[in-house]
Image: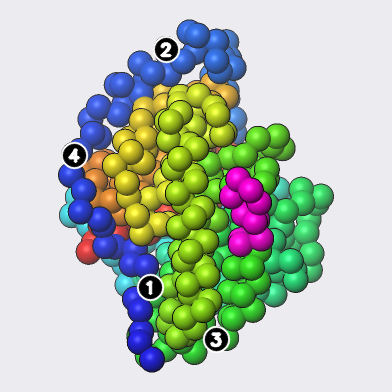
Amino acid sequence: MAVVALPDLVRPPNLDRVSRSLAVAGLGLLLVTSLASVGYLVVRTRPADLPLHADTVALAAGGEVTEVRAVEVVPGTRVLAGTPETDRLVAEERAWLAAGTVPVVDGVPRDLVVAGLLDLRVLSRTYGVPVAGWSPAWRHVWPRDSALAAAALARTGHVGDAERIVAFLGRVQPASGVLAARYLADGQGEPDDRGTQLDGVGWALWALAQVAGALPVGERADFIRQHSALLDRSSAAARMAIDNPRTLPPVSPDYWEVPERRRTLSTAALLAAGLESAAALYAVLGDEVARTTAADAATRLRSVVLARFEPDGFPRHLGGRADSVDLGVSFLLPPFSAQAEPAVVEAWRHAGLAMARPAGGLAPGGSWRRDGISWTNATATYALTAAAIGERVQARAWLGWLDRHRTPAGSFPEKVLADGRPASVAPLAWTAAAVVLTADALSA
């Protein structure tokens, strides 16, 4: 049986490596001003002011997880100081780090990557899989965040932790293959009526491929077989979603998590990425029929995405404005796809300008509300793409920005206000995972 390599997170395509990190901040602010002046976006009269829920989350006596201030934890850990179990919990945390690897990147503090790993570990402590955050509204499992966390943990040697995430997705996935927007962390259903998000199919397939790809070659086929239900259901759901005359998937919410009336680039891009991953997974199994079916579907979908979104500059919505570009264009590029067409790379570069916010980070999209807030998950995902396509200087610059805007305890907050203060929930699994993956890509 021929063994075909799975997508490699750290192998960038052969692109011109042009660093634009210095231009992003200045040009981005100019673009923000010009977009607001034409009235396309909602403009606030003053920047939003939100609290920071906690400096971090830490393990207390008995392994209980709790939100804490920086002064309450052992420095450089996610362990509450001054309890009878502090020393034991710190030792367990250090042993867990030592069991894996911490990617080393020139110019990037090791502590930054350690923080991402520890954030993922503490958010996984109670349920075995990482919740998005520990504040009540975030204490659920999103397929998107889970996929990134699984990839990050697998790439750093914590394969058991990564496999638990994949197994969770398989357990909660219905027969239709279409995952809900989020799940209760104990796997017993959904926390509300948000319903399904079609992009979860792509995330699940990508995560499965990333974890399999981190295993020794001889162990990959057995791992994939163990999770064959997730592979088969997700692949079938992805193909069914594009079984229509125009090939593009139907309207569905995506990572913005708002009701949609038009097709989004993000959903289409992630389904294409998922089908690419499925083809690689079936290849490892030696199932040529399934591999060809998935690969043909991926090629067909990607060609239609390029044909229909490229003329308008890859906007968020089909037929939208170029200045609405968002992370959807990142999902058309490595590490989510093995391909990187020049037009997509150029649109991705434009996205960094359109999404720029006053504190120097990025919003989820160019047409996101103008409240002055940078989102660390959007910024870290953009950094990940930069690293994966060979824009190493820019990727390091984004990691530097994330480093400077951590909480006093070193965790990654969800948001950064216009004046640079961390805000909202901390830590955030999505950001932590994307930071670790970016460092791993840069360490190659």
Q: Secondary structure beneath disc 2? A: helix
- Would residue 360 appear left or right of 187 to someone viewing this image? left
**Residue 38 marker:** none
**Could you tell me which residue is drawn at 44 percent across and 42 percent down?**
306
Give the CA distance from mark 4 to mark 3: 41 Å
Q: Secondary structure beneath disc 4? A: loop
The amino acid pointed to by label 3 is: Arg
Q: Is residue 162 visible?
A: no
Task: Specify the segment rendered in magenta.
Answer: 238-247
Q: Provide residue 104's location: percent of width, then percent of height.
A: 24, 62
Q: Which residue is mark 2?
A: 34
| Between discs 1 and 2, the one toward the N terminus | 1
Q: Which residue is mark 3?
A: 225
Dot in front, 1 or 2: 1
The amino acid pointed to by label 1 is: Leu
| Between discs 4 and 3, the one toward the N terminus | 4
Give the CA distance from mark 1 to mark 2: 43 Å
**Could you tell me which residue is drawn at 36 percent across and 41 percent down?**
344
Which of the image's four quarters has the C terminus? bottom left
Give the CA distance from mark 2 to mark 4: 25 Å
Q: Which residue is mark 1?
A: 6
